[in-house]
Amino acid sequence: MADDIKPRIRVPQNPKKGDVLEIKTLITHPMESGQRKDTQGNTIPRRIVNAMAVTYNGKPVFSGKLEPAISANPYLSFFVKVEESGTLAFEWKDDDGSVYTAEQKITLA
C-alpha cells in the first residue's frame, strides 16, 4: 500500500434513530487510466481504484465499480438510514491488488 493513499470520510454529527445520513468519502489516489505517456513516451500503467464497498454493522449499504474515466482523488457520496449505533466499514480495491480500508463509528443521540 502506498503511503500517499489516504481515505477520508465525513459523517453528520449527532444523528437520531431513523435519520437518513449523507456519507461523503474521498480517497487520495492518482487514478492512472493506462492511456497517458510519461516524458520518455512510455505508457504509464493503469492503476485505478476499481471498486468500493461499505458495510454498516456488517451489512452491505453501498458498493460501486469504478472505471478509468473517474478522476484522480475520487469523491463519492451516498445515503444511509441509521436505526442503531454502529460502525461503517469502507473498503477500496486497487488494480494492483492493494486494499485500502477505513472505519467510522456512528453513535445515535
Image (tube, rainbow, N blue to C red):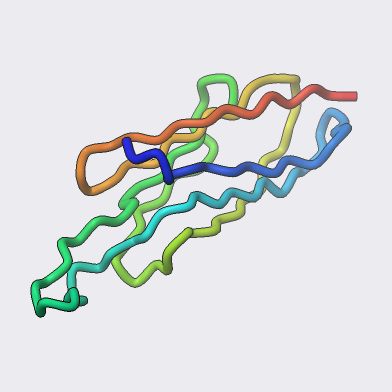
Quadrant occupied by the C terminus: top right
Q: Quadrant of residue 16?
A: top right
Residue sitting at x 84%, y 36%: 13
Find residue 72 and report its horizontal and vertical position in percent.
42, 64
Relative to 28, 84 lies left or right: right
Numbered disc total: 0
The foreground one among 66 and 84 is 66
Find residue 100 and report its horizontal and vertical position in percent.
40, 35
Q: Quadrant of residue 38?
A: bottom left
Relative to 47, 13 lies left or right: right
The foreground one among 16 and 107 is 107
Furthest residue in direction front, as rendered: 40
Quadrant occupied by the N terminus: top left
Residue sitting at x 75%, y 44%: 21
The foreground one among 46 and 68 is 46
Residue sitting at x 10%, y 79%: 41
The foreground one among 34 and 59 is 34
Find residue 62 and report its horizontal and vertical position in percent.
51, 43
Relative to 38, 29 lies left or right: right
Find residue 33 and report its horizontal and vertical position in percent.
25, 68
Q: Is residue 75 above or below residue 12?
A: below
